[in-house]
Amino acid sequence: MAESLHDKILALEQESRQLEPTGQDLEKLTNQVIAYGHHYLNNVDNLKAYDKDFALNNDLLAAGFPEKGKDIAQLLPIIEQHVDKPGINPASGNHLGYIPGGGVYPTALGDYLAAVTNQYSGVFYAGPGAVQMENLVIRWIADFLGFPAGSLGNLTSGGSIANLIAIVTARDAKGIKSKLVEDSCIYLTHQAHHSVQKAIRIAGLDEAKLCYIKTDEQFRMDTQMLEKQIEQDVLANKKPFLVIASAGTTDTGVVDPLDQIADICSSYNLWFHVDAAYGGFFMLVDELRDKFKGIKRADSLTIDPHKGLFLAYGLGAVIVRDVAALQKTHYYMANYMQDAVGDSHEPSPADLSPELTKHFRGLRIWLPLQLFGVKPFRQALLEKHYLAQYFYHEIRKMGFETGPEPALSVCIYRYNQNVSEANLFNQRLIKRIQDDGEIFISSTTIDGIFWLRIAVLVFRTHLKAVDRLLALLREHRDELLKLEE
Ligand SMILES: *Cc1c(COP(=O)(O)O)cnc(C)c1O
């Protein structure tokens, strides 16, 4: 007689139970992963900040996707060798390039718990505590930024998606339907992060007029030029609707004159978006709050906890003053969601973002803030600011040219004395630092000038790393100067 359906199901149950390690197997698996993590952390100060050696033809490729599972002890060396070693080390305190972050350890514990329980934070009815936690985190951020009570937003995967959510919300709130796109105007500067242009394109606003406003000698938006440009566009029957300012630019870390921009936006009834992905958390530091005057007047704001709050990658946030506008753009009702409607005491993230089923991101930020308290974050941010200032003064003593004194924790600098071709000299200088790999720095080009750049934002970066970089820069600069002779 053929096997009954009943027997087939029981046979398959035996197989599918392999997906649930239990007892000693569970313990052994977890312990080996934890041992790897601990070893990594105990050794992180000895790792290179940058390792350029990588070959695609490696054990990762060879591992394939086998029918039969393997032991974790076989897999960890592959991860160590081919994933964790090559490239820039984002956990390293010697990572002083781009906008780093570091990854405080409780982020991992929060993610661990979120994944083990697989809590759902998309809809209040399904995960009331998880949704409440996420909304509390967003309100805490809105609060220290000075946004009015009632502002809310969304925890995103990062700043790029936060910018996208803000821009589509602005588009809808200002009634920019497709027929109007060609006449509509968006104002920003060349110092805006490229994720802004990307978001504008994804939002279907590629044909809008992008007005790049001149910057002053500190690379901040020139508000007189902004107002002049808006006037011109209004007279030409265009539809100005959105100004995008930066609170901490990627190139030089400066903050646009937010209060004056807010004045202009309210005069002309424009949506005011602030990209504070990098700079926003410096608002936690009393000594630095003045630099952000006017930030609380924004209609929407992007901020990245995986940068300024030192969390591991995977957390940005958007804050929006008019929650109804945010909801209007993102709300959707489907028949199969009917149980989710009703007596919702908390707005649901699924109504305020493009996502439905999503990572429970609240725990990875709530847990570190509870465990450490907010104070060490404030102190670490002030330390990073002082480190950038210290670097600025020391590198000038070494004869380097610099950009503006660091407003937050980015500094641009270049060597330009007795060298035949300054751009080339500085390109050679950074190549030497990167090839060496002990410390990682990046560069940028502004108006045709090649600048070296440091961004101090890994929580593990302390005075020693900055002093070591200064020594390396001196050493390689001197060697290159000898070659010039
Ligand atoms: C990093 C950054 C972004 C993009 O954020 P992601 O988290 O990388 O997606 C946007 N704007 C600024 C100013 C940034 O520094």
Image (cartoon, rainbow, N blue to C red):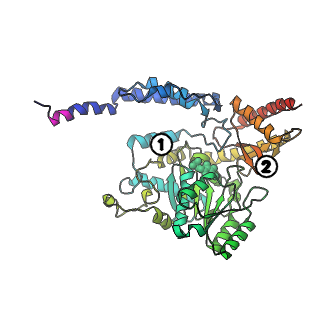
Q: Amino acid at mark 2?
A: Gly
10 Å neighbourhood of mark 1: few (<14), some, or many (≥20)?
many
Q: Position of residue 481 (x, y in %)?
A: 85, 32
Choose between 299 and 467: the one closer to the eye.
299
Q: Position of residue 473 (x, y in %)?
A: 78, 34
User: Is there a contact, CB below 8 Å, between mark 2 and mark 1?
Assistant: no
Q: In the rendered image of this protein, does residue 299 appear above or below residue 96? A: below
Relative to 203, 452 lies left or right: right
User: What label sits on residue 58 in the rendered view?
Assistant: none
Identity of the residue drawn at 71% across and 58% down = 291
In 3D space, how far apart are the residues under numbered discs 2 and 1 (Cα atoms)?
Answer: 39 Å
Whether residue 7 is in magenta: the answer is yes
Relative to 392, 165 lies left or right: left
Identity of the residue drawn at 38% across and 52% down = 127
Q: Which residue bears the numbered disc 2?
A: 403
- Helix, strand or loop under label 1: helix
Q: Tell me which corner region of the image, top left, top right, bottom left or bottom right, holds residue 224.
A: bottom right
Observer able to see residue 35: no
**Magenta stretch prevailing secondary structure:** helix
- Helix, strand or loop under label 2: loop
What segment carries the magenta color?
4-8
Relative to 460, 83 lies left or right: left
Choose between 106 and 67: the one closer to the eye.
67
Q: Quadrant of the C terminus?
A: top right
Identity of the residue drawn at 79% across and 38% down = 424
Q: Amino acid at mark 1?
A: Gly
Earlier-in-chain disc, 2 versus 1: 1
User: What label sits on residue 110 in the rendered view?
Assistant: 1
Q: Position of residue 135 (x, y in %)?
A: 48, 56
Q: In the rendered image of this protein, does residue 32 appear above or below residue 148? A: above
